[in-house]
Structure formats: C-alpha cells, structure tokens
Amino acid sequence: MLIPSNHSVFMKKVLLLLTLALFSSSWLSSSQLSAAPIPTLKKQAKFLFQQKPQRLPKKSQKQIILGVQNDISPVKQNAHSARATPYAYKSIRKKISSKSAIIIDAETSGILFSILPDKQRQPASTIKILTGMIAIKSLKNTELISVSKKASQMPRSKVYLDTRKKYKANDLINAVLLASANDASVAIAEKIAGSEKEFAEMMTLRAKIWGAKNTICKTATGLTKHGQKSTARDLALIFRHAMLDKEFVKRMNRSKIRTSYGKTLRNHNRALKSVKGAIAGKTGYTDVARQTYVGQFSRAGESIIVAIMGSETMWQDIKQLVDYGFQRKHNLQAAIN
C-alpha cells in the first residue's frame, strides 16, 4: 500500500514534537538541579565566630613569673625570690667599686655573681697564693733558705730578711701568705727554681693546670710588671684549688703567728675579724692594680668564694658581695626545692 505524501510530512512533524518534548524534559531537570540550594557553612561559621572564649574560674588562674634573662634556673611560683634577683643585682652593682668581681659556689664553682670576670688585670699580691702553694708542696718546713741581695731589696710589704742569715721554709711561707712579704716570696722562688723568672713560669703552669687559663705570672710577688695578668674568675679558681689543701687552709686561717726567730706575723686579711663566716683570704695592692682580694666564706654549711680586682673600697666591697652571695645561693636553692 502506498503512503500518501502528506502522511510522511505528518510523521516528520510527530518526530519533531517528540524531540522537542524530550529536550524540554532534559532542560527542566538540569535547571531544577542547578537551581537547588547549595549547602554552606556560612551560618555555622558565623555562629562559632560570635561565641565568646571560655574563661577559667578566677581561682584556677595562675600567674606565671618568668626568670631573669640568661638564667636557666627553674621557674617557680615564688614571686618574691623571682623578682628580687634583678633588682638585688642592680643594687649590689651600685654599692661596690670593684672593676671586676666574681662570686662562685666553693663546691661546684657555679657563678652566683660577676662583673667583667674575664677582664685581665694586674693581680698584685693575690698571686702569692701560687707562690705559697708551690712552696708548701716543694719544701720541708725545716729546710733552710738563704736570702739574696735582690730578695732583701724588695719593696714593702716585707719582713726585712737579712742576707747574712738563713730562714726556715715554714717561717717564709707564713710570711708570704699572711704578711704578704715580697722579700720572702723572692727568697722562696730562688730556692726552688734558681731564679724568680723561672719560678714565675712554674706559677703560670700551675695556674693553667687549675683551670686559670688567663693568668700569666712574671713575678713571685705580684708587683706590677708588663705582661703579668690574671682575672677575677682565675683568682677564684686558683683559690678554690688551694683551699683543698689542709696545710694551706691551716696557715691562712690564722690571724697572727710567731716565727721561730721571734717575729710576729699578722694576717693582712681583715675579713677574718670583720666579715661573718670568713675562712681564709689573700689581699693585694699596687698603684696599677689597686685593691685586689680573693677569699672563702662559709655560713650554715654553705661556702662561697669572692674575688675582686681594681677596688677602691675593698673591705666594704667584700662585705657587700659576701652577703649578696649567700642570699643569692639561698634563693636559688629555694627555687629548686
């Protein structure tokens, strides 16, 4: 059967309508999907942003107090001890005239206070600690020592040794350590090493063995000489090692002693009578070095060593530093405990 031509036209129209219908259906679906609301966190974020931070109850809030700059000691809640340290340091710094100073724990050598501790200066008679210690280890107490013209002509302090006589080593060692005798120092140096120069090299070596690396000795007396130098830290280390020797301590702890030839030697360390807890110490003075000192002090079972150089008010400085040193040590121990 033949299909009229107009029928084919009709079928084409039907197919066109069906295509349009399908396209419209697909378009509506995609439009509806694209028009659907997309979930956001806008409201939630706004809500969280507006929330106020929670605060701890007042009773549970604790104030943290930071320590002193460059101080690695544990931080504690003790506000008094933590705050007192920097102010006390400034206060003690203003009260002393020493150009260099140090306080160390006699047991651990830990530093409790310092002002230019490694600045090299002329040590004056504090260096006689080395002279005395080498003599103690090198000579017998009864050994006789001659006195050269050079030794007898040393300037004060001196015990006026006679070149025509010989003296027991015990007497001259005490003259060096207590009376700070320059003539006795040179006599001992020449007896042990043959010359003061050679003996000074022995002193420098002994200082380095004890950790005093910035100390160079040129004399047995500490009298000013070019190239001779030490530091407050070195003096403290030298004295700490010397104090381990019982014979040294026994000699240095005496206020006065009488020699075998009848002369009374008086200890130049006035701190033995004026500063609480003084055990031993050595003084020094020259025009260049000014006043120098190193000594050990003990209170309530604790010990510290104080060394000063370039002071104009030595005994006042020592008293201030000793009091500060023990207070500082007490505060540190309280913080740790």
Image (spheres, rainbow, N blue to C red):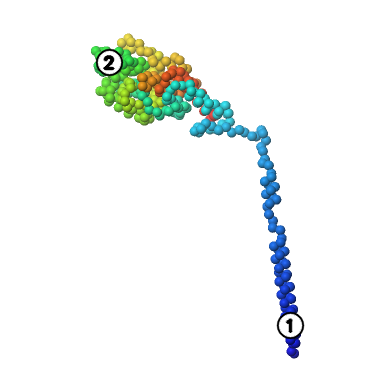
Query: Which of the 4 image quadrants contains residue 19?
Result: bottom right
Query: Which of the 4 image quadrants contains residue 103?
Result: top left
Q: Residue at x 45, y 29 (%)?
A: 110
Is label 1 in a helix, a strand or a loop?
helix
Residue 110 in sight from this viewpoint: yes
* Sequence-first disc among 2 and 1: 1
* Residue type for callout 2: Ser
Q: Residue at x 52, y 31 (%)?
A: 68
Residue bearing the label numbered 2: 152
Q: Residue at x 45, y 24 (%)?
A: 304
Q: Position of residue 192 (x, y in %)?
A: 28, 22
Residue bearing the label numbered 1: 9
Q: Nearer the viewer, residue 157 or 298?
A: 157
Which quarter of the rendering shows the N terminus?
A: bottom right
Residue 179, above or below 208: above
Q: Nearer the viewer, residue 67 or 275?
A: 67
Q: Position of residue 307 (x, y in %)?
A: 42, 23
Q: Crowdedness of circle 1 by 10 Å Cα count: few (<14), some, many (20+)?
A: few
**Left-right relation of 298 to 154:** right
**Left-right relation of 203 to 34:** left
* Residue type for callout 1: Val
Residue 297 in sight from this viewpoint: no
Q: What's the CA distance linking mark 2 and mark 1?
A: 148 Å
Is label 2 in a helix, a strand or a loop?
helix
Q: Nearer the viewer, residue 98 or 205?
A: 98
Q: Position of residue 275 (x, y in %)?
A: 46, 17
